Amino acid sequence: MNAFRTLTATAMLAGACVAATPAWSQSKTIYIGMNGGPMEKAYTSQVLPMFEKANDTKVVVVPGTSSDILAKLLANRNHPQVHVAFLDDGVMARAVSLGVCEKLDDSAELKQLYPFARMKDDIGAGVQLGMTGIAYNKKLFAEKGWAPPTSWLDFADPKYKGKVVFQSASSSTFGLHGFLAMNRLWGGSETNVEPAFTKWASTVGPNVVEYIPNSAKISEMVQTGEAGLFPLTPTGVADLQDKGLPVAYVSPKEGPVLLLVDVCVVKNNPDDKLAQKLAQFLLSAPAQEKAAEAGKQIPTNRQAKMPASMQQSLGNIDELVHKVTVVDWEAINAHRAQWDTRWNQQIER
């Protein structure tokens, strides 16, 4: 039917000898890589239509994990199919080091961001603010008479034996953040992870009921009562709450770990001007307000307003961001392969 309509329209235009190109044929298509699921739904339903209408452009989401998207960019680095990419900050650091991103154009939107959301030389910028902290099963805690957790070291409390679910540090940013947060409390750093690898087996390890590759299984494990305590972000907790699950988020007293989703304009993309324009739009207050409203995405633009329910749940964002721990992704990525091997052999064996 679509093909028939297209051919008919073409014939009619030709027969009428229309000299001017019709406006609808000038519309373009631009591709953006991002996580699927709730993020994709939020952006396609509320955010991207604003850009499409203003620019007579169709924005198509290419869904996938950050690692999947980076793999696509590397495989097609000379002729990329994706114009703009959303990548978790650790993967973005790798993308930048591998030369697949280009500098963002100077703009008013960049100046409105929290300073930590601007990458070095503006090669990319944070489009969503996340903070990996502690999530817990409120129903289970109430049944056990446990007070809400307060510290990263609660993961090592013996009373939680068999009730901790930990995402794999070799495949999940949440798991890696939790591992590094406790490593710091035990005297380590991103250049020295011996404390965590040495202490894990006698502290957190006995409490873990299962190591999972990502957070997809947490929903099921909360429902069965297996998951009592696990690392997660406020947005991740909100997604579970939207499913009716009895979970809550706690910002650890030592501070959560900063987790940014960064936006990158892909080098050698087919329409650089439009790609830069889309990136600026995504960093703007109006776009981030829509993302907060539709998907509980925490803004990185200081002028963006969040819905009242988010504001009440999170509290003062300016105060929160002063407490976050910022990890050194350059140091992490330099040793990540070794850590992954050691984690898989020593901890998840």
Image: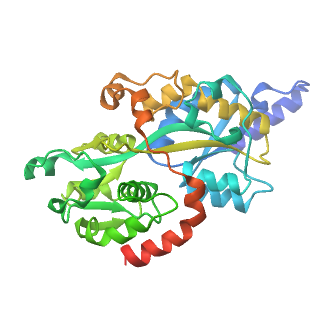
Which quadrant of the rendered structure holds the N terminus?
top right
Residue 327 in sight from this viewpoint? yes
Q: Is residue 269 above or below residue 294?
A: below
Q: Is residue 38 left or right of residue 114?
A: left
| Residue 236 figure quarter | top left
Q: Is residue 315 above or below residue 265?
A: above
Q: Is residue 74 left or right of residue 215?
A: right
User: What is the number of callouts on the image?
Assistant: 0
Q: In the image, residue 313 lies at what x, y percent? A: 30, 31
Q: In the image, residue 71 lies at what x, y percent? A: 64, 61
Q: In the image, residue 220 lies at what x, y percent? A: 27, 57
Q: Is residue 18 left or right of residue 142?
A: right
Residue lying at 21% horizontally and 61% vertically, measured from the top left? 163
Which quadrant of the rendered structure holds the C terminus?
bottom left
Residue lying at 75% horizontally and 53% vertically, measured from the top left? 80
**Which coloring applies here?**
rainbow
Residue 64 in sight from this viewpoint? no
| Residue 103 figure quarter | top right
Residue lying at 49% horizontally and 27% vertically, measured from the top left? 290
Q: Is residue 106 above or below residue 140?
A: above
In this view, the residue in front, 64 or 53, is: 64
Q: In the image, residue 26 lies at what x, y percent? A: 79, 31
Q: Residue furthest front?
A: 187
In this view, the residue in front, 42 or 345, is: 345
| Residue 4 figure quarter | top right
Q: Is residue 17 left or right of residue 46?
A: right
